[in-house]
Image: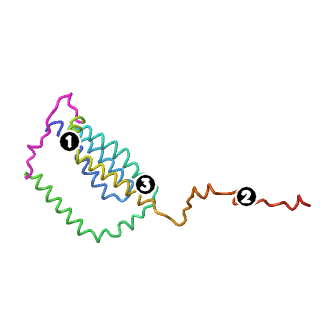
Amino acid sequence: MGFEKIIFYFFAAILVVSALRVITVRNTVHAALFLVLAFFTTAALWLMLEAEFLAMTLVLVYVGAVMVLFLFVVMMLDIDVSVLRAGFTRYLPVGATVAVVVIIEMSYFLLGGFDNSKFTPVKHGVEYSNTRAIGNVLYTDYLFVFEIAAVILLLAIVAAISLTLRKRKDTRYQTPGNQVKVRKSDRIRIVKDMDTES
């Protein structure tokens, strides 16, 4: 077994263990940290496949932005874990069925049903740029799909903003028209001091 396979199995083992710890650990902050570890090991595996752009995007976007935001939210909110785990036994049969189906499919591919000879990565020279190759494919063959995905993400952002902008009864709003029409008598009331008159 070569050095490259040893590195691959090392990172793959860390990835599997960290992914299992994400769903089995009781503390939500620890689960988020194990997810960060899973992202890092996935990025390392992508680096071995010469997908440097995807690996750096995974680290910068997910680890650097999404997971940090998620950690802040989890640490600031007081989440009652007992309420979240209350319906665990009710959905256990469905989850177990899905897990068995996934294990059967993975076993089928791992035990020889999957011909990986067609998907072996091609070794490239030093001058090869993975980012340029992804850009060429993304903005030529998949340009229309890429634009549709951008529009869908824009709609999701607008929907998320519109869902948070609810009108509340206890919120005070300013009306610029009423502020312009204000007079001195509406804001100031002059009271004469009784001591100065005497």
Q: Is residue 14 magenta?
A: no
- Residue at x-position 32% and y-position 42%: 59
**How many residues crowd mark 1 within 10 Å: few (<14), some (14–19), many (20+)?**
some
Which residue in the rendered view is the most extreme toward the bottom? 90
- Residue 73 is tagged as 3
Q: Image quadrant of residue 124?
A: top left
Q: Is residue 188 left or right of residue 39?
A: right
Query: Which sits earlier in the primary sequence, circle 3 or circle 1?
Result: 1
Mark 2 or mark 3: whose residue is earlier in sequence:
3
| Magenta stretch: includes residue 116 | yes
Q: Which residue is mark 2?
A: 188
Q: Relative to 15, is 99 above or below?
A: below
The magenta stretch is 113-130
| Amino acid type of the residue that numbered disc 2 sits on in the rendered structure | Ile
User: Which structural element holds mark 1?
Assistant: helix
Disc nearest the viewer among 1 and 2: 2
Q: CA distance from mark 1 to mark 2?
A: 76 Å
Give whichever of 100, 140 is nearer the camera.
Answer: 140
Amino acid, disc 3? Val
10 Å crowding of disc 2: few (<14), some (14-19), many (20+): few
Label 1 sits on what residue type? Answer: Phe
Residue at 55 percent across and 65 percent down: it is 170
Q: Which is nearer the N-term, disc 1 or disc 2? A: 1
